[in-house]
Image (spheres, grey):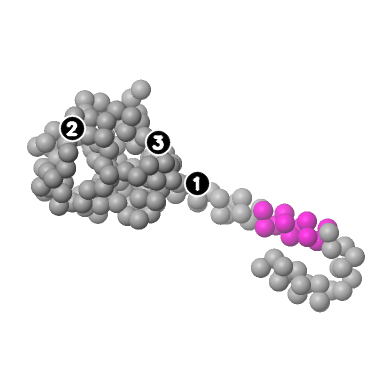
């Protein structure tokens, strides 16, 4: 886009050719400023890095399962953790069809959280560790461990 804009600008103002380097530097600074001021801040707010840092701490303690993750969340888990995380669907969780051990952590997408699921989790000894807002959705982290929250050392 910058090259097309520059070509159009140069055709309209032929005297600019002599000062082309300065104009290109000005274009670069404008585009850099737009990126730093308007594009980068929303990207940082939408980052999943803080969530996966918490999940990696839980993974060091025991097993972690993603429950009904979106493709974005699956890709981010592989990107930030460098491994594929085991995935459960809601039905598996309700039926208890997974290898459940002490220190198990469940990372649950807000779309599959309902009263039935929460009551089953409570009956199995799971308690909420954290509720994070990621992009436009909430992610709930439940564990059957004795740790009170993810912010504990």
Residue at the farthest top position: 153
Q: Relative to 100, is 151 on the left or the right? A: right
CA distance for labels 3 and 1: 15 Å
Q: Nearer the viewer, residue 31 or 145?
A: 145
Residue at (57%, 54%) from the top-left corner? 38
Residue carrying label 1: 44
The residue wearing badge 3 is 53
Mark earlier in primary sequence (3, 2): 3
Q: Tell me whether circle 1 and circle 2 mark residues in contact (CB < 8 Å).
A: no
**Where residue 41 appears, x then y in whole percent?**
53, 49
The correct choice, above or below, for 19 with respect to 101 in the image is below
Q: Which residues are magenta?
A: 22-32
Crowd around label 3: few <14 · some 14–19 · many ≥20 (10 Å):
few
Q: Which residue is mark 2?
A: 101
> Dot 2 surroundings within 10 Å: few (below 14), some, or many (20 or more)?
few
Where is the N terminus found, in terms of image quarters?
bottom right
Residue 95, relative to residue 145: is it above or below? below
User: Answer yes or no: do the residues labelled 3 and 1 have beta carbons within 8 Å?
Assistant: no
**Residue 69: % across, % down:** 29, 51
Quadrant of image for the C terminus: top left
Report x, y in % for residue 86: 27, 44
- What SS does tag 2 mark? loop
């Amino acid at each position: 886009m910058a090259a097309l804009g520059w070509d159009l600008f140069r055709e309209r103002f032929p005297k600019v050719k002599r000062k082309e380097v300065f104009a290109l530097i000005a274009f670069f600074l404008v585009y850099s400023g737009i990126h730093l001021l308007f594009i980068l801040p929303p990207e940082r707010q939408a980052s999943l890095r803080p969530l996966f840092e918490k999940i990696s701490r839980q993974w060091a303690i025991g097993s972690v399962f993603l429950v009904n993750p979106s493709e974005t969340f699956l890709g981010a888990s592989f990107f930030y953790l460098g491994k594929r995380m085991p995935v459960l669907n809601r039905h598996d969780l309700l039926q208890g069809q997974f290898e459940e051990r002490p220190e198990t952590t469940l990372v649950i997408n807000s779309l599959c959280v309902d009263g039935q699921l929460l009551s089953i989790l409570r009956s199995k000894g799971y308690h909420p560790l954290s509720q994070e807002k990621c992009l436009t959705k909430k992610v709930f982290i439940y564990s059957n461990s004795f740790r009170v929250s993810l912010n504990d050392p």
